[in-house]
Amino acid sequence: DGGITQSPKYLFRKEGQNVTLSCEQNLNHDAMYWYRQDPGQGLRLIYYSQIVNDFQKGDIAEGYSVSREKKESFPLTVTSAQKNPTAFYLCASTGRVDGYTFGSGTRLTVV
Amino acid sequence: ILNVEQSPQSLHVQEGDSTNFTCSFPSSNFYALHWYRWETAKSPEALFVMTLNGDEKKKGRISATLNTKEGYSYLYIKGSQPEDSATYLCALNVRGNNRLAFGKGNQVVVIP
């Protein structure tokens, strides 16, 4: 079955550490996105990629980095520069005419 | 940053009752309006993609309307059931950009 897989589901990180969240899709979608959700807030765009080897900053990119070396994969690194990394992270992808397909998310907690 | 507003933020509905809620968005450069259903611990699930002014779409007991001139969409749930309990997300696509701008969601709790 086609879909998006995010791993891990829960992640704990010590302050000052970088951590990478995985997002893999087998839908042959060109575009992929990373969103962050905080309590009482809508989904906010961190980074997106329209095509392999290309990506753009979203609305809240500071403290994050991404790569898009393969069509199927769009990992997000939360760096130590991100001041408030505890949040729920959601990955999505889309084809030309589809709506978005979402992963099931990763909850990151800084301890 | 596009401002997409959803109201009410949360609502409790008695089983069997019908309900509706609103998504408001800036109407300039409109391209498409998306509705998603997001159950706890699951992925958001696409309900509707609406593009034309006056569009009405239906999926089972859930339906949606779109007014692009005044910048709003309504989502209706007829005869609410406990399985309808979820957060309903509205998201806007503007012309020339396939990024989505999301509202905060309408959290619906159906009381048996």
Image (cartoon, coloured by chain):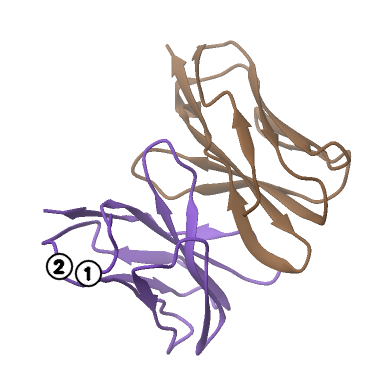
Chain colours: A purple, B brown
The alpha-carbon separation of the residues under discs 2 and 1 comes to 5 Å
In this rendering, would B20 be left or right of A28? right
In the image, A41 versus A72, the foreground residue is A41
Q: Amino acid at mark 1?
A: Ser
Residue at image position (53%, 60%) is A101
Q: Residues within 10 Å of mark 2 (few under 14, many from 20)?
A: few
Residue B77: image x %, image y %?
63, 24
Whether B20 is drawn above or below B38: the answer is: above
Whether A67 is drawn above or below B7: the answer is: below
Residue A4: image x %, image y %?
43, 66
Asked if residue A100 can be seen in this view, the reply is yes
Q: Amino acid at mark 2?
A: Gly
In the image, B39 versus B32, the foreground residue is B32
In this rendering, would A58 be left or right of A76? right
Residue A32: image x %, image y %?
51, 71
Chain ID, mark 1: A
Residue at image position (36%, 38%) is A39
State which tag comes first along the sequence, 2 or 1: 2
Identify the disc placed on residue A16.
Answer: 2
- Asked if the residue under mark 1 is in contact with the one under mark 2, i.e. CB atoms within 8 Å, the reply is yes
Q: Quadrant of the N terminus of chain A?
A: bottom left
Q: Secondary structure at mark 2?
A: loop
Residue A19: image x %, image y %?
22, 70
Residue at image position (85%, 36%) is B70
Residue at image position (76%, 45%) is B26
In this rendering, would A102 be left or right of A13? right
The answer to whether tags 2 and 1 share a subunit is yes
Question: Which corner quadrant of the image does residue A97 belong to?
Answer: bottom right
Q: Circle 1 is placed at which residue position? A: A80
Whether A18 is drawn above or below B55: the answer is: below
